[in-house]
């Protein structure tokens, strides 16, 4: 009994000593000790969630973590992560990464070798967008993912690669700059800047675009915007448009392509250059034909081009001016009509319609023909 009493008295005395140390000794030293301990603390299977008032903004689950200093955490082997929108719905999920640095006070996280999925309920086909980036930084302040180095974005048959990008989680848009490559089915695009609006079903591209559509045409222009409508996809072209198909080059400043109908419309300073043909009667250095118009409509399905004027057609010493025209690409002829005036050397002809057969080099004029020859 006496032994038990002595043990209890010893425990009480030890407890008093601890309390004296905690409450009487300098608390700064104790806090510093805790900080130093945290700096060396390693945690297994950690889960971190970032909040804005009462709303979750992001969360990360990692295999292990190292407390570095005060509010900095280093994460290893991130197995899952999520970014939420203003309605607490996940917009970026299945985030996986090799390594991450988290600064809690700044609500900032930097990750390396990142893969993730982005919800795209209104973008094109209703499938998530998968992405990979060598480095990713997320700041809660502007709710934006910054993507760096070897970026690859994929959705179904769409693939985008770039070196720098932004993904705004609040307004749901993606922007790539400093060069990009875009691939979709049989279309390949290279350019300087690319925007994707996940809400409006729009893609915009800028900066010396080079577009290749297999078995259709090659296209260069300054900017392009794609809209997805109930009737199909529409591409709006702008600035220094150059379209090449086989032996023809088409130039203009403003354009529109309806993919479902396979129709292309070009306006403003339109110029069509036909560099070669099968004409036996035309000399080799005279094979270049140039047609200038205000507007053209190219029907890829029916292989027909319609021109509206005024139209000016030149070939070697031949010049034809008309109001409108239509070209049959299958049979390789063009008909110009409406106040037609034809000039060749010192011969002048006026008529209602003129038809040029490119395969034979023949010219056929009809309707109220008037000729004039200068001697």
Image (tube, rainbow, N blue to C red):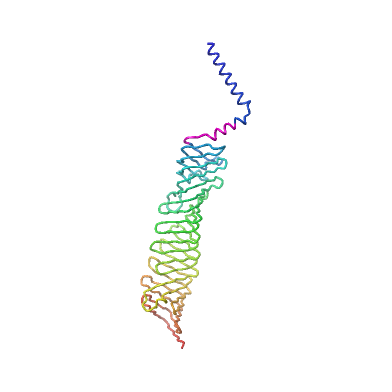
In the image, residue 115 above or below residue 248 = above
Q: Where residue 113 sits: x, y (%)?
A: 46, 46
In the rendered image, residue 288, in percent from the top left (x then y), is placed at 43, 74
Is residue 34 shown in magenta? yes
Check if residue 251 falls in the magenta segment.
no
Residue 122 location in percent, x, y?
46, 51
Q: Position of residue 93 (x, y in %)?
A: 46, 44
334 w.r.t. 59: above or below: below
Count all numbered tags in the image, as a single digit.
Answer: 0
- Which of the 4 image quadrants contains residue 185? bottom left
- Towards the viewer: 310 or 42: 42
Question: Is the magenta region chiefly helix, strand or loop?
Answer: helix
Which residues are the magenta region?
31-45
Residue at 56%, 46% (x, y): give it. 141
Instruction: Using the image, determine if residue 114 lies above or below residue 14.
Output: below
Q: Residue 181, located in which quarter of the rendered image? A: bottom left
Residue placed most toward the observer, 348 or 164: 164
Write the residue at 47% across / 75% down: 312
Q: Residue furthest bottom?
A: 375
- Residue 134, compared with residue 223, is above or below; it is above
């Amino acid at each position: 009994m006496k032994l038990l009493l002595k043990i209890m008295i010893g425990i009480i005395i030890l407890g008093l000593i601890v309390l004296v140390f905690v409450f009487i000794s300098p608390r700064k030293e104790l806090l510093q000790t805790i900080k130093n301990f945290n700096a060396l603390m390693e945690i297994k299977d950690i889960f971190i969630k970032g909040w804005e008032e009462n709303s979750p903004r992001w969360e990360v689950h990692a295999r292990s973590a190292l407390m570095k200093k005060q509010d900095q955490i280093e994460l290893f082997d991130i197995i899952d992560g999520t970014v939420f929108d203003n309605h607490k719905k996940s917009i970026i999920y299945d985030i996986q990464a090799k390594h991450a640095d988290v600064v809690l006070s700044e609500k900032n996280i930097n990750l390396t070798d990142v893969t993730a999925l982005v919800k795209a309920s209104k973008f094109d086909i209703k499938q998530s967008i998968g992405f990979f980036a060598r480095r990713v930084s997320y700041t809660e302040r502007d709710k934006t993912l910054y993507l760096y180095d070897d970026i690859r974005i994929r959705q179904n048959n769409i693939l985008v690669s770039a070196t720098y990008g932004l993904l705004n989680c609040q307004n749901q848009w993606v922007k790539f700059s400093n060069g990009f490559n875009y691939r979709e089915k049989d279309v390949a695009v290279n350019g300087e800047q690319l925007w994707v609006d996940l809400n409006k079903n729009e893609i915009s591209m800028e900066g010396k675009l080079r577009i290749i559509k297999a078995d259709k045409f090659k296209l260069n222009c300054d900017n392009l915007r794609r809209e997805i409508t109930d009737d199909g996809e529409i591409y709006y072209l702008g600035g220094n448009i150059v379209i090449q198909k086989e032996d023809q080059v088409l130039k203009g400043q403003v354009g529109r392509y309806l993919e479902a109908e396979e129709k292309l419309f070009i306006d403003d300073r339109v110029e069509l250059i036909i560099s070669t043909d099968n004409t036996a009667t035309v000399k080799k250095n005279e094979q270049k034909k140039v047609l200038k118009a205000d507007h053209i409509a190219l029907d890829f399905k029916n292989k027909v081009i319609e021109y509206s004027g005024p139209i000016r057609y030149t070939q070697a010493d031949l010049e034809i001016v008309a109001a409108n025209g239509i070209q049959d690409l299958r049979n390789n002829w063009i008909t110009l009509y409406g106040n037609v005036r034809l000039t060749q050397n010192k011969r002048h002809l006026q008529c209602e319609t003129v038809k040029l057969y490119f395969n034979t080099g023949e010219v056929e004029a009809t309707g109220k023909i008037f000729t004039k020859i200068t001697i």
